[in-house]
Amino acid sequence: MNVLDFTVKRPGGEPAPLAQYAGKVLLIVNVASKCGFTPQYEGLEALYRKYRARGFEILAFPCNQFGHQEPGDAEEIASFCALTYDVTFPLFAKIDVNGNEADPLYTYLKKSKPGVLGTKRIKWNFTKFLVNREGAVIARFAPTVKPKDLENAIHSLLSQSANRWNRSSPH
């Protein structure tokens, strides 16, 4: 099992199989519009624009579990992200990342890459998971890690896996 085996929901509730991202390096992030880390949207968008053509995608999951920092509905969240930070990467349906109602994708991510001292719980919004082209979770980054500080890891993963993926791709 890997990340590509999951299906998540788009903001309107439609299913979105993550298999559509096979062959892409992914950064999966739980986000919020009213968080101290919200300005990271700017850095995330910069990474997305720089590396998207090389097979990089950011998958953002709004979450209201931390200080009620994402109270809006799907339309309000999308509008805020577009107008405030010119976000063009995909936003998915609002989810829980901890507890009994945690989205299965996040249950898997936390199990695959526990946090400090083996903790599985997501501590706050803007926790980031880096996933390779085959769907394996490679790294977990705390909310305090700025998007620009992920650039070397993303660049390295894109470079390492590009040749292997291109050889095995049916294109």
Image (cartoon, helix red, strand yellow):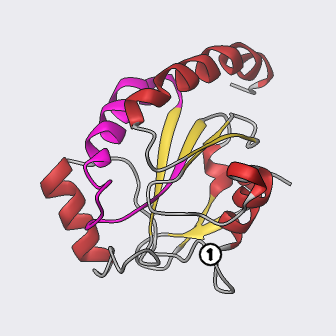
Q: In which quarter of the image is the C terminus?
A: top right
Task: Say if 82 sits above or below 157 in the image.
Answer: below
Q: In this view, does 2 lie to the left or right of 166?
A: right
Q: Is residue 45 magenta?
A: yes
Give the farthest residue toward the right.
1
Question: Up-down: is 9 above or below 61?
Answer: below
Residue closer to the observer: 122 or 85: 122
Relative side of 87 to 90, left or right: left
Name the residue rendered at 55%, 77% in the picture.
Answer: 96
Residue 59 falls inside the magenta stretch: no
How far across and down, in percent of the image, does residue 10 sit? 47, 69
Nearest the eye: 16 or 97: 97
Q: At which x and y percent is residue 60?
A: 45, 56
> Where, quadrant-wise, is the N terminus in this rendering?
bottom right
- Give x and y (percent) for residue 36: 28, 58
Residue 162 appears left or right of 124:
right
Q: Mark 1 points at which residue?
A: 98
Please tell me in which quadrant of the rendered image residue 72 appears: bottom left
Residue 143 picture location, percent across and down: 46, 50
**Callout 1 secondary element:** loop
Residue 166 falls in which quadrant of the image?
Answer: top right
Left or right, residue 146 beside residue 166? left
Q: How many marks?
A: 1
Out of 26 and 96, give the one closest to the viewer: 96
**Is 116 located above or below residue 75 in the figure?**
above
Which stretch appears magenta? 28-55
Callout 1, which amino acid? Asn
Bin the neighbour count of mark 1 within 10 Å (Cα to Cα): few under 14, some 14-19, many 20 and up. some
Name the residue: 35% across, 80% down.
Answer: 68
Q: In this view, does 78 lie above or below 57?
A: below
Residue at the spot 46% in from the left edge and 24% down from the top edge: 151
From this viewpoint, which residue is outermost toward the bottom? Answer: 100
